[in-house]
Image (tube, rainbow, N blue to C red):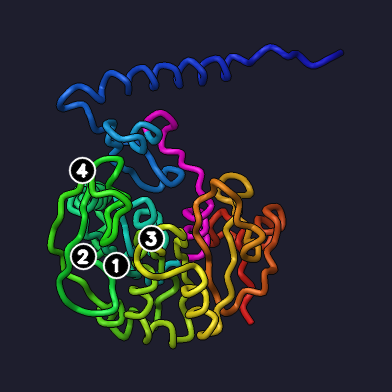
């Protein structure tokens, strides 16, 4: 007997629910007081306020908080309870929330977001979950302490806030504090620092030059956005960032999705695919040996997160 090709009742219900959420979001985004919706995020580990006036908020609402992203999955796979995580360019908290659930109250998360609109959304999401072990700074990471003009955007453009934006249309210029990451961590936090994520719209090299103590320390890995146009506007390049890491013994890899909450690493630049978020994972200890998802699930043990990454230390 051939298997039935008719959709199941559960598939019909799921499809009907998706259509309903799509229609509901299309209406709610124009109604004052209904433009934000709380949705589960990170596999239900936390919640996030979806702003239905933005493309990101609509996606989160319509997919019930699903956001397939190999870089976010990598953060969830790498961090452990008690770790320290730095989120440079935290935006509304997509990485910060995942990190906070993994490191827990015994850990620490430092989130830097100088753009006012995004920072307010970030603080709202943290308060929603009671993640009081996250410290939020209104400063931008740089190679010096001071104050600098910063183009701040709102809504969908908030992620493009920058010292050197591609366009200033719609920007609100603000004077924001700049800090060196080396000055922001306590000795205890530095000793537990596991991962630094930088998405700074071109200011990544400057931030790294302000993190010399961290680069010289033995522990942390980095997840860095390397977007050539952004770097070029800041007088940097992909090559200059990678050269700095090479001088400190780091090797670059590209996170590659392998299914829900499963991610592998591909040697850079062979794994860098057009249209994929240009994030590079940099580590001293990974030999590129990564278990496939089935093997990871078999060897991780009950205390490990459900992810395929198993970075093998030298």
Looking at the picture, tell me which residue is in the foreground, 85 or 127.
85
In the rendered image, residue 281, in percent from the top left (x then y), is placed at 53, 66
Q: Is residue 124 above or below residue 18?
A: below
Q: Of marks 3 and 4, which one's residue comes earlier in the chain?
A: 4
Residue drawn at the location 56% of the way across and 79% of the way down? 284
Residue drawn at the location 52% of the way across and 60% of the way down? 77
Q: Which residue is mark 1?
A: 110
Q: Residue furthest left?
A: 175
Q: Is residue 232 above or below residue 142?
A: above
- Please state which of the two labelled residues, at mark 4 or mark 2, is closer to the viewer: 4
Q: What is the spatial separation of the Cα atoms under label 4 and label 2, in whole angstroms? A: 24 Å
Mark 1 neighbour density, 10 Å: few (under 14) some (14–19) many (20 or more) = many
- Please state which of the two labelled residues, at mark 1 or mark 4, is closer to the viewer: 4
Looking at the picture, tell me which residue is in the foreground, 210 or 188.
210
- Please state which of the two labelled residues, at mark 3 or mark 4, is closer to the viewer: 4
- Please state which of the two labelled residues, at mark 2 or mark 3, is closer to the viewer: 3
Q: What is the spatial separation of the Cα atoms under label 3 and label 4, in whole angstroms? A: 21 Å
Query: Helix, strand or loop at disc 2?
Result: strand
Q: Which residue is mark 4?
A: 170
Query: Helix, strand or loop at disc 1?
Result: strand
Q: Which residue is mark 3?
A: 199
Can you tell which quarter of the image residue 304 is in?
Answer: bottom right
Q: Work out which quarter of the rendered image holds the N terminus and state it.
A: top right
Q: Are marks 2 and 1 in contact (CB under 8 Å)?
A: yes
In the drawing, does residue 93 fall left or right of residue 294?
left
In the rendered image, residue 99, in percent from the top left (x then y), is placed at 39, 60
Q: What is the spatial separation of the Cα atoms under label 1 and label 4, in whole angstroms? A: 28 Å
Can you tell which quarter of the image residue 195 is in?
Answer: bottom left
| Residue 137, label in figure | 2
Per the rendered image, the range of residues in magenta is 61-79
């Amino acid at each position: 007997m051939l298997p039935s090709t008719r959709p199941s009742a559960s598939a019909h219900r799921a499809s009907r629910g998706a259509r309903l959420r799509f229609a509901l979001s299309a209406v709610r985004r124009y109604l004052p007081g209904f433009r934000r919706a709380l949705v589960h995020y990170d596999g239900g580990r936390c919640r996030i306020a979806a702003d239905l006036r933005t493309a990101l908020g609509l996606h989160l609402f319509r997919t019930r908080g699903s956001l397939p992203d190999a870089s976010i999955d990598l953060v969830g796979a790498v961090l452990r309870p008690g770790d320290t995580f730095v989120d440079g360019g935290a935006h509304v908290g997509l990485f910060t929330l995942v990190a906070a659930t993994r490191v827990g109250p015994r850990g620490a998360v430092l989130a830097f977001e100088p753009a006012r609109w995004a920072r307010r959304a970030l603080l709202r999401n943290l308060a929603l979950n009671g993640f009081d072990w996250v410290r939020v700074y209104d400063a931008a990471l740089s190679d010096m302490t001071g104050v600098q003009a910063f183009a701040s955007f709102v809504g969908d453009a908030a992620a493009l806030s920058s010292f050197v934006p591609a366009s200033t249309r719609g920007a609100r210029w603000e004077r924001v504090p700049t800090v060196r990451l080396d000055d922001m961590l306590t000795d205890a936090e530095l000793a537990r620092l596991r991962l630094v994520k930088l998405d700074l719209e071109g200011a990544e090299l400057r931030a790294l030059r302000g993190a010399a103590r961290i680069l010289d320390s033995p522990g942390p890995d980095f997840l860095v956005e390397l977007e050539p146009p952004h770097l070029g506007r800041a007088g940097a390049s992909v090559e200059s960032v990678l050269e700095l890491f090479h001088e400190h013994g780091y090797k670059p890899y590209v996170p590659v999705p392998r299914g829900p909450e499963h991610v592998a690493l591909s040697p850079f630049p062979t794994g860098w695919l057009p249209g994929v978020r240009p994030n590079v994972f940099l580590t001293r200890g990974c030999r590129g040996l990564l278990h496939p998802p089935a093997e990871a699930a078999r060897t991780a043990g009950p205390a490990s997160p459900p992810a395929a990454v198993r970075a093998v230390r030298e």
